[in-house]
Image (cartoon, coloured by chain):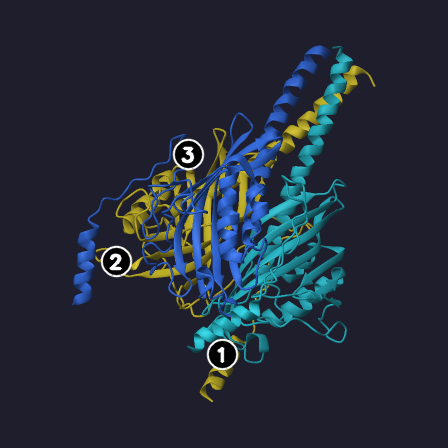
Chain colours: A yellow, B cyan, C blue
Amino acid sequence: MTDTARIEALENQVADLARRLTVREDELDVRKLQHLYGYLIDKCMYNETVDLFTDDAEVRFFGGVWKGKEGARRLYVERFQKRFTHGNNGPIDGFLLDHPQLQDIITIDPDGVTAHARARSMMQAGRHKDYLTPDNPMMANPRQWWEGGIYENTYKKVDGVWRIHVLNYFPHWHADFDKGWAYTEAEYVPFPKVLYPEDPSGPDALIEDHWLWPTHKLLPFHMPHPVTGKEMVAERWQGDIDRVKAKADAQAAE
Amino acid sequence: MTDTARIEALENQVADLARRLTVREDELDVRKLQHLYGYLIDKCMYNETVDLFTDDAEVRFFGGVWKGKEGARRLYVERFQKRFTHGNNGPIDGFLLDHPQLQDIITIDPDGVTAHARARSMMQAGRHKDYLTPDNPMMANPRQWWEGGIYENTYKKVDGVWRIHVLNYFPHWHADFDKGWAYTEAEYVPFPKVLYPEDPSGPDALIEDHWLWPTHKLLPFHMPHPVTGKEMVAERWQGDIDRVKAKADAQAAE
Amino acid sequence: MTDTARIEALENQVADLARRLTVREDELDVRKLQHLYGYLIDKCMYNETVDLFTDDAEVRFFGGVWKGKEGARRLYVERFQKRFTHGNNGPIDGFLLDHPQLQDIITIDPDGVTAHARARSMMQAGRHKDYLTPDNPMMANPRQWWEGGIYENTYKKVDGVWRIHVLNYFPHWHADFDKGWAYTEAEYVPFPKVLYPEDPSGPDALIEDHWLWPTHKLLPFHMPHPVTGKEMVAERWQGDIDRVKAKADAQAAE
């Protein structure tokens, strides 16, 4: 092979390596971004949280959609910071809202500037008995619960830096610390019903197909099955739950 | 240096970079595969789970070994899908079996087509009080528990795609949601004792050296210590536990 | 472009790829190191834990600082191994101390031999009722608790292998399994007060600014905000907690 041919082969190989490496750098950087989101939310650093979003961001959260970076600010700063931390940008004593960030599967689109992640959290939340604030309806009683949820987020690279484009968090179960997930009451968390601006920190739109445990469905995956290449779709059991519940009632009455 | 010498140096460097990058791509892809396993198992998508395995797979689970992809199908579809979800390939209301996938350490063998992972889960499992099915012995009572376990899995790259070769899951503790791990009764989970085909969804073989909390041993690591290069072996305390338990009984009787 | 010019361009590109790939290899290897730390601590393999540290290591833990690899040995082997496992280098029945390692954000310094990680654990710890040792004050009663904490560690690459340089673990909350984080008593874990050598396994120094839940502060981040480039600093609420507590007392007395 001539030198020129070898150079051409090298140029192709190097371009291919650069492309492959960039994909993995992006995966790892999106992962760090999502992890940082968790650390910031843990510690009620809502201003820094909002700075993670794109200008055209969307936050899908507990049945509401907050649109644009201004919507994100309304949710995190106007709603959470006021309700949870007396307006403080940082943790306050006696208030816990830990969001461990777990189990990411990150996919970079061929455009190199769009990313998707499936990820999850398993939260610890509550208010300590010695730090209640009776004038704040959210903070007037000791309360403690576990929460599990799944993210299907998208991200965009803007000016060379990955940012959150759509934060789509879907809680999959709640459990009172005392009672557990076998005894969670329906509508454990009340969803927002009033839109902005009627509710000054409310969402721009509602999500109609929300559900909460003990209802249990699949949050769709952003990617196909890696072996079969097929979409991963859940069947929905149409069994006679009324019949089995009637049976259970009858047994209990015996 | 001549152009030709520089080209040769570049060819060597590029080959080395390609080799190194491939190892990391493989680590990250095996990680995604194991994470997907968790998401599929969470949501009782047993058909898609079976598709993650090689034809010569092995599932080592609660004292049994299910062999081949057919064995995996027997375990996930014939056993779990029938017992847990009324044959539904997907989640059903009131049944929780979350498997967060955590803390992977993945090693790619020099052959480039075999991988090993140590990983763990910390599960939330149970049946909600409003969704009992009295005609299903596994689902007739509300029940809820935590479970921690460790994986030491192997994977194979077949036709360019990583698949699970040996899924070796070893639960390390169970805890009733109400009582906790300080009060777990021995044999918290009954292990299968009857082999296939006598049990139509039973294992092909039993694992003799199984144990369950409060017994506590080391599941061996697939890799050596990264600093010393030595195998990491646990000592086994041979203390006089009978004596200390007798002492405890005597104290309790005082 | 001449062959020589193309070769020079390739040499620059290859050098750049090598530099970028090395950073990601280092991130992934530090991650494995921290994950292994978790697995070893889980299983009370204290000798292998100490081997993960540099000679000039530092362990910052529960208000104490243990200095040098000898300090690490004093903490893990002289203190923990004696108190927890009767001197056994490995797990013992009935003693649980699981440290899942979660949510790493790893930064490699430009020098290529120093790394920083923010990471977290969410622990399960306790002693099973059937395995008490009345002659060991740490192990005489059944006890079980959850613990959440954050690491801000540094690592050094010595002789080509990453090692832990500063292990800085800061517990953020404790919860009795029975009562939960809303009812944690102050000073849930007593901090060491007596220095080495007066206490033969004590720390070399004390950390003055320690705190435990329900106090709640930010453990500083090692890195700036990825979008704004600014330091991430928490505000500290100076609200009239005495007033709100007095109000709560008044309400309770009604």
Q: To which residue does mark 3 refer?
A: C225
Measured as percent of width and height from the top left, residue B26 is found at 67, 41
Residue at figure coordinates x 46%, y 84% from the top left: A252
Position of C219 relative to A193 (above/below)? above
Q: To which residue does mark 1 refer?
A: A245
Quadrant placement of the N terminus of chain B: top right
Q: Earlier in the sequence, mark 1 or mark 2?
A: 2
Q: Do circles 1 and 3 both sit on a common chain?
A: no
Q: Nearer the viewer, mark 1 or mark 3?
A: 3
Position of A84 relative to B134 (above/below)? above
Measured as percent of width and height from the top left, residue B110 is found at 75, 40
Residue most extreme to the front: C198
Q: To which residue does mark 2 refer?
A: A137
Q: Nearer the viewer, residue A159 or C57?
A: C57
Which quadrant would residue A67 be assigned to in this image?
top left
Residue B119 visible = yes
**Total number of numbered labels?**
3
Instruction: Indicate the chain on which mark 2 is placed.
Output: A
Q: Is residue A236 left or right of residue A252?
A: right
Residue A212 visible = no
Instruction: Indicate the chain on which mark 3 is placed.
Output: C
Residue at figure coordinates x 49%, y 65% from the top left: C133
